[in-house]
Image: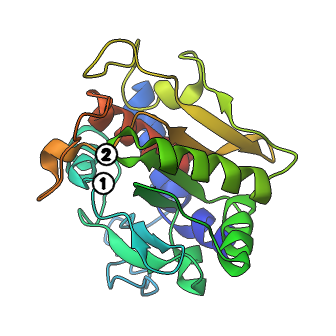
């Protein structure tokens, strides 16, 4: 199940290293002091769906509502996460159906698009369990789509009737993991705040009505007059760090 996978995923070592990078702390040598100097630690790593070792963080790009895809969300931020933090990533998204059990192998999934949609009950149930077990959904209205925004809010009300989307203030931890983000910047004026759904004391859904897609790095995609958030790369890196740390 995913909550077990997330604990193993970067695992405690990834979290410790990431905290070390972010907080400027040193790792105590006591953990390895008792080992002989010629000891080689050879810990087998279980296979993941994408074929990478378990220490590599993989992100899923969802196929939802049957056949709708999230193709216009750039994976460019994964390379920056690897450069500016201790998170090792697969650099590319893996395409995963929302109704699939494969969903639980990932710490974070991406959901974006344009136009109206309705999730089947199986996809709703799978997404609810994924988030309740520690997964992160990063959702973004492609091209600031009004129809997609309405559909996504309707689905969140169905999936989490007792946990609403609420604005995330800039003092929230998600804005202060890898980078300190003081403001959201957009193409046209002041953007709408990011919103989150909190489940079991942590934010499990982060949503941008304007869009975090980074279409400038997506082949064949554009913002098409929407109000995409322009510092989305740093924000997406922070969201990834939050997903593996919390």
Q: Quadrant of residue 155?
A: bottom right
- The answer to which of 169 and 123 lies nearer the viewer is 123
Whether residue 30 is visible, yes or no, is no
The disc label shown at residue 109, or none:
none
Element carrying mark 1: loop
Whether residue 34 is visible, yes or no, is yes
Split into 4 quadrants, where in the image is the N terminus? bottom right
Question: Of the residues under marks 1 and 2, which one precedes in the sequence?
Answer: 1
Separation of residues labelled 1 and 2 (CA atoms): 4 Å
Instruction: Report whether 33 appears left or right of 1.
Output: left
Q: How is the image coloured?
A: rainbow
The residue that mark 2 highlights is 213
Q: Residue furthest right?
A: 162
147 vs 179: above or below: below
The disc label shown at residue 73, or none:
1
Which percent across, then down, holds residue 13?
49, 56
Q: Are marks 1 and 2 in contact (CB under 8 Å)?
A: yes
Q: Residue at x 70, y 42 (%)?
A: 197
Which percent across, then down, holds residue 72?
27, 57
Q: Residue at x 43, y 85 (%)?
A: 44
Q: Residue at x 74, y 69 (%)?
A: 129
Which percent across, then down, holds residue 71?
29, 64
- The answer to which of 160 and 76 lies nearer the viewer is 160
Which percent across, then down, holds residue 214?
24, 42
Q: Residue at x 37, y 76 (%)?
A: 95
Crowding near pointer 2: few (<14 within 10 Å), some, many (20+)?
many
Split into 4 quadrants, where in the image is the C terminus? top right
Instruction: Report whether 137 appears left or right of 141.
Output: right
191 vs 93: above or below: above
- The answer to which of 79 and 166 lies nearer the viewer is 166
Element carrying mark 2: loop
């Amino acid at each position: 199940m995913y909550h077990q996978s997330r604990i193993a995923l970067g695992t405690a070592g990834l979290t410790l290293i990431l905290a070390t990078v972010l907080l400027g702390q040193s790792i105590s040598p006591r953990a390895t002091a008792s080992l002989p100097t010629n000891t080689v630690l050879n810990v087998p790593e279980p296979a993941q769906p994408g074929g990478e070792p378990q220490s590599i963080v993989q992100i899923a790009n969802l196929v939802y509502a049957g056949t709708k895809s999230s193709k216009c969300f750039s994976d460019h931020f994964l390379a920056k996460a690897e450069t500016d933090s201790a998170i090792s990533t697969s650099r590319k998204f893996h395409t995963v159906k929302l109704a699939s059990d494969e969903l639980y192998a990932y710490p974070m999934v991406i959901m974006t698009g344009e136009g109206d949609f309705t999730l089947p009950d199986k996809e709703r149930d799978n997404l609810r369990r994924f988030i309740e077990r520690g997964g992160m959904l990063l959702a973004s209205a492609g091209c600031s789509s009004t129809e997609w925004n309405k559909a996504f809010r309707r689905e969140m009300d169905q999936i989490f009737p007792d946990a609403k989307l609420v604005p995330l203030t800039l003092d929230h931890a998600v804005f202060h993991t890898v980078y300190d983000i003081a403001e959201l910047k957009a193409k046209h004026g002041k953007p709408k705040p990011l919103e989150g759904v909190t489940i079991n004391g942590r934010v499990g859904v982060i949503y941008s009505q304007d869009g975090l897609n980074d279409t400038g790095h997506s082949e064949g995609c554009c913002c098409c007059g929407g109000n995409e958030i322009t510092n989305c790369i740093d924000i997406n890196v922070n969201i990834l760090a939050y997903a593996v740390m919390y």
